[in-house]
Each structure stands twice: as structure tokens, then as C-alpha cells.
Image (cartoon, rainbow, N blue to C red):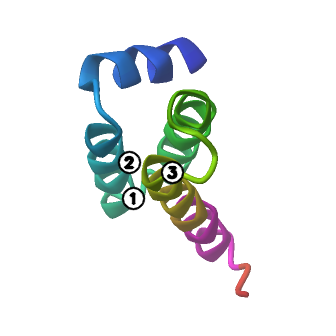
Amino acid sequence: MVWLSLALIFSLGTPAAVDRKASSYLQQERFQDADKLCRTALALFETAYGPDSLETALILNDLTLAYRGEGFRRGIRN
């Protein structure tokens, strides 16, 4: 699945496009897919743009939403 996430990131090309795809997964409640995409993108974006960049922050936000979505799906409420 990591190869699929990497291929998707490279095919989408930009951090904003990856953010849109992750948002699409989140809207479809495909939290695990969003999680995998975001974790893979996070490592790449931190290296390319730095850990304090807007691009990295967008992915961290999506990753947070994926984690929360999984928690709500499992009945875990914060």
C-alpha cells in the first residue's frame, strides 16, 4: 500500500493536490486510506518543504482528521 500512496503522491504532483485527495478520502469516510496517504506525504513534504511549512501543516491537519474519524468510527470519543 505504501507504493500505491507514493505513486499517488507523484501522480498528483503538488502538496495541494495531495491535500485534496486526502480530503476526498475523509469525506468518503475512507479514514485508513487518508491516514496512509498523509503519513507517506508527511515524510516527503517535511523533507522537501521543511517541518514548519504550510505544505506540511496541511498534511498534518488531514492526518489529524483521519485519526479522529477512525476514533469516532470505533466509538472512541475524545
Which residue appears at 57% of the width and 46% of the height? Answer: 35
Number of callouts: 3
Precedes in sequence: disc 3 or disc 2: 2
Q: Which mark is residue 53?
A: 3
Quarter in which the C terminus is drawn: bottom right
Please tell me in which quadrant of the rendered image residue 39 appears: top right
Confirm or deny contact between disc 1 and disc 2 (CB under 8 A). Answer: yes
Which residue appears at 28% of the width and 24% of the height? Answer: 13
Is residue 70 at all visible to an observer of this figure?
Answer: yes
For disc 2, the neighbor class at 10 Å (few under 14, some 14 to 19, many from 20) is many
Magenta stretch, residue numbers: 66-75
Residue 78 to residue 9: above or below: below
For disc 1, the neighbor class at 10 Å (few under 14, some 14 to 19, many from 20) is many
Measured in 3D between alpha carbons, the distance from the residue under mark 3 to the one under mark 2, in whole angstroms, is: 18 Å
Residue 69 to residue 76: above or below: above
Residue type (three-letter) at the residue carrying disc 3: Ser
